[in-house]
Amino acid sequence: MNRFQKEDDSPRNFVTRDGKFDAAHRVLHERFKCFNLHGHEYHYELTFSWSSSLDLGYAIDFKEIKRVVCEWIDETMDHGFIANPQDLQFISICNQLGLKVYRMNGAGTDSFCNPTAENIAKELFYAADVLLSNTGLNTHSVKLWETMNCHVECTGLSAAEQTLFETSDLTTQLLDWKSAQGTVEYDARRVLS
């Protein structure tokens, strides 16, 4: 076994796409300043593992990750309020004003789930996994920077977390988004003229 392979002899192949979004949040019941409404310029790194390349020589075109996953993040979270589903006052105010609100799903629909960097990273991990299913990629990790010097990394979900996500409204929203995006053929040889 060489140093570039895992013990099971499968190659270590990864593809990563970076992005960023701006969003407001607050942490319910936190005793200090994060209880207040505030915002961050979040930076993220989505990493996927793959075992076989397409005929063009890559696992996936980077544009496809952007078109499906990064655009979903932009549409749902960028310049919005990421909310604990129990933060009913702020959600109500945002709705009255017609502002963008993203309700966290990590604890199940309408359960307590603070929009911490850790929980947002889990949401992004699940979303990326669903949105790029059937592409030959597996979500390997999501790194999320809340500030320049603080970040979290999610490398998977527990069975209980996976079940909560799968039974939440998020799954339907993701599948609808994926369907609406359609498919793009990147190999010119496969496109009929």
Image: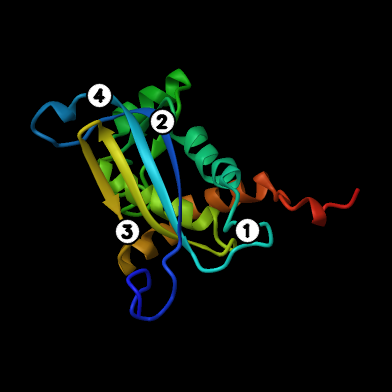
**Disc 4, SS:** loop
**Relative to 188, 46 lies left or right:** left
Residue at the image point whose x is 47% and y is 57% from the top: 129
Residue at the image point whose x is 32% and y is 46% from the top: 143
Mark 1 or 2: in front is 1
- Label of residue 57 in the image: 1
Residue at the image point whose x is 52% and y is 45% from the top: 69
Query: Which residue is more in the foreground, 71 or 185?
Result: 185
Mark 3 lies on residue: 155
Badge 2: residue crowd in 10 Å (few <14, some 14–19, many ≥20): some
Q: Amino acid at mark 1?
A: Gly
Residue situated furthest front in the rendering: 2
Mark 2 lies on residue: 21
In this rendering, the answer to whether 3 lies above or below 78 is below
Image coordinates of residue 111 in percent, x first then y, are 30, 49
**Disc 3, SS:** loop
Residue situated furthest right in the rendering: 193
